Image (cartoon, rainbow, N blue to C red):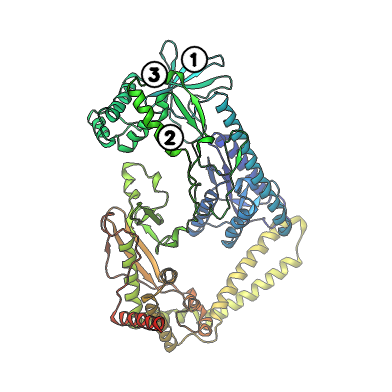
Amino acid sequence: MIHDSYINGKQYLPYARCSTKAQGDNSVEQQLGAILSFGTERGATATKPIVRVGVSASVEWNVDEFVREVKERLDRGEQFDFVFVFDESRLTRGGPLHSSKVRYDLLAMGVDVIGVTRYIEDPRTRQMITTFDAMAAQAHAEAIATNASRGAQQSLEDGRRAHCAFPPYGIDKLITTSEGEALWILRHLADGSQEQYNAKTKELIRTYKPNDGRGGSTHYIKSRQERATLCPGMASLHAHVVRMFTAFDIEKMSCEQIAKESNDAMIPSPSGGRWNASAVHSILHNPTYLGKGYANQRSSALKVKRSRNAPERVTRSQIEMMGRKSPPMEFRPRENWVEIEYPLLSEYLQSPLRDIAEQRIEMHLKAKAKGHTPTMRQRSPVAASYLLSGIIRSKQLNLTMRGHSGGTKSVYRYYVVQGRKKYNRDSERYLRKSVPAEPIESAVLSALQNTLCGMPALMDEYLSALQNERKIIFADNEIDQLRAREEKLLSTIDWLTQSFEAKRRDYFTERLEAAMAELDDVREQLGTADIAEPPTDDELRSWAQAVRNGADLLADATFAEKRRLVELFVKDCVIDMKTLECEITLAMPDWKAVADDGVGLSSTLACRVGWWTKLPQMAWKADYEVRVPSPCLSAKRKQPELLGCGACRRKSRMNRSDHSDRKAA
């Protein structure tokens, strides 16, 4: 074991990541093997690792999700001092700026990041090397994207692949040799599986299972010598596509009417479920049914996108990608499109139906020919407009909830369970609900204001609890015992350092670390008990009045001020996802926190009685429970308004009238 490292004896969190699911089996195992070997050499203890397969580190959102997961594990009480990664590219490929941000955020939680392949003991030298490694990882990611884009573009221009990965409804994929001889027909089914047929005899050869997301693709993989084109699919689906075109172009039926007709005939949609107008519209405006396919119509590339002569670099600042999982979809101009002919689909629609559909689809393509690049507006953080984001949680499984917006014309505000999409079983589907935000936020602010306004009346209960704590903390015999223990530990540490033997290094190191840890704990207890005088009842009552002043701040507070008061006083906000009933619990914050937030308490007095931060919080349940209405009611994006007590309302009206008078003057 290596003894001259500050990692010795510490706990660490192994973190392994790979960008594609095909690498999941080998890459992750090799990374964890190197990390665990590195930790064993230095006597460090590993906790349960975090493994992320099929996650790109070029998308900064994915890395920030990892940081949030580390924070959640620390909040649950797990103890570790380091995060071990294989190298810098496993942590992030967002460049040195993002790498520094991630490391700084983790360091603020008391966790340092160590790359095991290029570990340097000196922290300043390690920071410098880490910066260069982050630049190299970003450059390597851009090189991979450039090569992939160039290869995909060349494959399209040479006719070795179709313009789409999954054929449209009623169309199959035909695999041929480089000379054009038909080999196989691949049919994609609605459940994600794939069937392989002999192109000549039409006999079923094999069925490929749906991709399970845990490894490489389970579908047919085309070799480099084979080519892919499109051909008519199953006869029943072909007939249904022709019927939809006939109903739309000849009978002048709407997309909604065609969808209803398809559902009445019990014909499954491309996804295997019911038809809707959007699915019908996408089929009726798809030029593939005319024997033409257009690649490069859209792009959501992060670094490089396909282009005719050479891959085109995407210029996008890191600020624009903050808070986004992916760039917005860009519709490219027609000169960037790649047209691919499908001779086997030229007679998919017969004349005169084909001629009518061709004119209509061509008008649709002309409308898209100019292209459209959406503006990259910076998205605000999740909690920017949600008062309880990260505070509210579900009663079932104790899951954290976050803010979520929905709607187009009228934007609605909800709270949803983080990672709710993974709760797909029937017994857990209630966790996928969207809970309206406004009624819960209004109830929390009302409960907070009522509690703050009634603070002086609650102090008798609180003072009696503090008197009991004084008897324990300020007992003379306990302080004497702590000081005696401190002297004994100091003498033990002095003996261990003087009697140190290299042959018994492990024994002395273990004893010394244990003694120093206990000494720190004893001195912390003495620091809280060594205050000259505990606060008097009058001082505590002045503190209560200062807290009462916080109710006045709520009357005309900004969102940031309300959010901070909620963080201070709301201990718990739990919602039953089955019944949508919310239970609110308020708690007294520590003395110093109230002073630092400017609620009206003298900072000198707060420092003098800082021992109070060690006392348990006193909690009050709200005197009512909130029954949240159905999601379609009271969910519009509006911040909750406070009514409060009469004094608060009068003060709010006076403040507004004074402001209007000053504005008029």
The residue indicated by pointer 3 is: 347
Q: Nearer the viewer, residue 353 or 566?
A: 353
Q: Which amino acid type is marked by label 3?
A: Glu
Q: Earlier in the sequence, mark 1 or mark 2?
A: 1
Q: Nearer the viewer, residue 549 or 341?
A: 341
Q: Which amino acid type is marked by label 1?
A: Leu
Element at label 2:
helix
Element at label 3:
loop
Image coordinates for residue 33, horizontal then vertical, percent = 62, 41
Whether residue 44 is situated above or below residue 183 in the rendered picture: below
Q: Quadrant of residue 387?
A: bottom left
Q: Nearer the viewer, mark 1 or mark 2?
A: 2
Q: At x 52% / y 50%, what residue is drawn? A: 61
Image coordinates for residue 456, horizontal then vertical, percent = 35, 83
Q: Which amino acid type is marked by label 2?
A: Leu
The residue indicated by pointer 2 is: 365
Image coordinates for residue 8, horizontal then vertical, percent = 67, 55
Q: Is residue 15 left or right of residue 8?
A: left
Q: Quadrant of residue 643?
A: bottom left
Q: Quadrant of the C terminus?
A: bottom left
Q: CA distance from mark 2 to mark 3?
A: 20 Å
Disc sitting over residue 183 in the figure:
1
Disc sitting over residue 102 in the figure:
none
